[in-house]
Amino acid sequence: FIDDVRIYDYALSQGEVLSIAGVAEAYNELTSVANLYDEEPMNSKIVNFKDYALLADRWLDEGLFP
């Protein structure tokens, strides 16, 4: 259910929306081509050994990377 409705006559910036929502900062997902393993929880995606293991497993597969 909706408990707060506000109408603005301009588009809010990302910072304004986060402030109203009570969130400290936005979540920006890692977009690196080296991030092959996607099972990490939200806000903790890093390029790590699991990504390296997947890359090594596919190393000799013929095809374009990524």
Image (cartoon, rainbow, N blue to C red):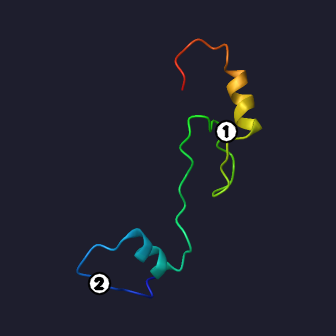
Q: CB atoms at circles 1 and 2 under 8 Å apart? A: no
Q: Position of residue 66 (x, y in %)?
A: 54, 26
Q: Quadrant of residue 36?
A: top right
As drawn, the label of residue 37 is: 1
Identify the residue at image location x=55%, y=52%.
29
Seen at 68% across and 45% down, the residue is 39
Q: Along the horizontal axis of the image, is 49 left or right of 13? A: right
What amino acid is at disc 1?
A: Tyr
Residue displayed at 73% across by 40% down: 48
Viewer-closest of 15 and 21: 15
Q: Position of residue 5 (x, y in %)?
A: 37, 86
* Residue at disc 1, secondary structure: loop
Q: Determine the residue positioned at 61% across, 35% down.
A: 34
Compared with 55, 46 (above or below) is below
- Marks 1 and 2 sit apart, C-alpha to C-alpha, by 41 Å
- From what the image shows, is residue 44 above or below residue 37? below
Earlier in the chain: of badge 1 and badge 2, it is 2
Label 2 belongs to which residue? 7
Question: How many numbered callouts?
Answer: 2
Where residue 54 appears, x then y in whole percent?
Answer: 70, 29
**Residue occupying the far left of the picture:** 9
10 Å neighbourhood of mark 1: few (<14), some, or many (≥20)? some
Left or right: 27 as drawn, with respect to 43:
left
Q: Amino acid at mark 2?
A: Ile
Quarter-of-image position of residue 55: top right
Work out whether 36 lies above or below 6. Answer: above
Left or right of 17? Residue 55 is: right
| Crowd rating for badge 2 (residues with CA inside 10 Å; few <14, some 14–19, many 20+) | few
Q: Position of residue 31 (x, y in %)?
A: 53, 44
